[in-house]
Amino acid sequence: MISVEAAQGIIRDHLPAPRVERIYFQAALHRVLAESLPATMDLPPFDRAAVDGYALRSADVPVVPVDLELIGEIRAGGVPPAALRGGEAAAITTGAPVPAGADAILMMEHSRVSPDGRKVSILRPIGAGQNIVPRSFEAAAGEAALPAGRLLGPAEIAVLATFGYTEIAVFRRPRVALLATGDELIEVQEVPEHNQIRNSNAYSLTAQLKSLGIEPDYLGIAADNPDDLRVKIAAGLDHDVMIVSGGASVGPYDLVKGAFGELGIRILFDRVAVRPGKPTIFGRKDDHLIFGLPGNPVSSFVSFENFVRPALGRMCGLAHPELMRVAGELEATMRQTPGRTAFLPAIACLGAGGWNIGPLPWKGSGDILGFSRANALVIFPADRCEMARGERVEALLFSDFILRRS
């Protein structure tokens, strides 16, 4: 049995190189850029008005008030008039190009237009450069705009559009196969007999995969017999990653590890010193990764977050795909038998004094109902038997933590 950290290190060491594909930029939200993109033009491409007002020559207003002749109006997207001469001004809107000869924009509220609209009175002094955004102030053509490795959010999509990048290279999301195992399992739409339960792991794992933008191929339920397991696992080995839920322990009907071996999968670890989730298996065949997760629903959830999410995230190009780790004050004393690192359900909230971590009642790895109330996992170190109320502890925030705020 190896530590959580050792297991995570083995997985990192066996990740295949990320693959790249080209996609339309509007489909790139939450993808990771696989190429560096330079600015294709100066931004702004001209001296730009930062306010609505009047373009003028600051040398014409050494003292105020002073009247200037209005020679026209410049709108965003419009064509500026001829260069300003001494004693002239032009009305201008925010975002419009500053006419030649002008070196300042006076805000509209600091002026007064004559009744005939031919002159404007300048009521406040103004210096050169005021209220003008100079050409290339935000970016110069050729300089770095978006680096490789950047996660593309809404602002980055706007940058792509600004510079005309309609097709871009991103890291490809891995293809994932998902298989549930167990004679006791039936599908959600079926009515269970006294010895059956509905398959929930496949659907929680599907939701966890979707949080990474991955839509898995669900291969159904495999019976607890070697032949059926081999056939269904073999069907998933043409994917980049295969996840098998259940059958990973050491009971007489836990046959997954044996099926992996028969199919030529090299098993790199099969037990981890973690609670819940000890019977977690990780293997590799060629460039295909295979995870065997425990059958209990909370164990399956926690094992995914500790081992599968970081692997898939890195394959998607993310530099730090792990759940966010925070430190805060423990709100109740916790105890455990030492020997395994525990990841237990908790409620984390950020108050004026920092994070507060409140452990939830722990009824075991089958209690998915109780676990569903959590928004975090409090981390109980393997070498500790007690963490006292008020102690500073660490917790992992769920990927949808922000959405779970009350």
Image: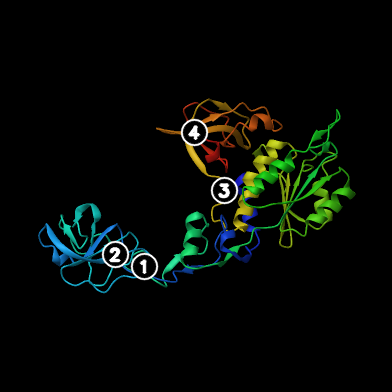
Asked if the residue at tag 4 contacts the one at tag 1, i.e. Cβ–Cβ closer than 8 Å, the answer is: no
What kind of element bears circle 3? loop
Q: Quote the CA–CA distance across marks 1 and 2.
A: 9 Å
Give the CA distance from mark 1 to mark 4: 51 Å
Q: Quadrant of the N terminus?
A: top right
| Residue 332: percent from left, percent from top | 52, 25
Judge depth for marks 1 and 3 and give the one in front.
Answer: 1
Element assignment for label 4: strand
- Are dots 1 and 2 in contact, CB under 8 Å? yes
Along the polypeptide, which appears first: circle 3 or circle 4? 3
Circle 1 sits on which residue? 78
Q: Position of residue 337 (x, y in %)?
A: 63, 30
When the figure is inspected, residue 214 is found, relative to residue 221, above or below; the finding is below
Mark 4 — residue?
349
Q: Which residue is mark 3?
A: 322
Left or right: residue 69 compared with residue 260: left
For residue 24, what is the image quadrant? bottom right
Residue at mark 1 to residue at mark 3: CA–CA distance: 49 Å
Asked whether residue 10 appears in the rendered view, the answer is no
Label 2 belongs to which residue?
73
* Residue kind at label 1, given as amino acid type: Gly
Sooner in the amino-acid sequence: mark 2 or mark 3:
2
Task: Give the SS element for disc 2.
Answer: strand
Foreground tag (2 vs 3): 2
> Is tag 1's residue or tag 3's residue first in the polypeptide sequence?
1
Identity of the residue drawn at 56% across and 63% down: 25
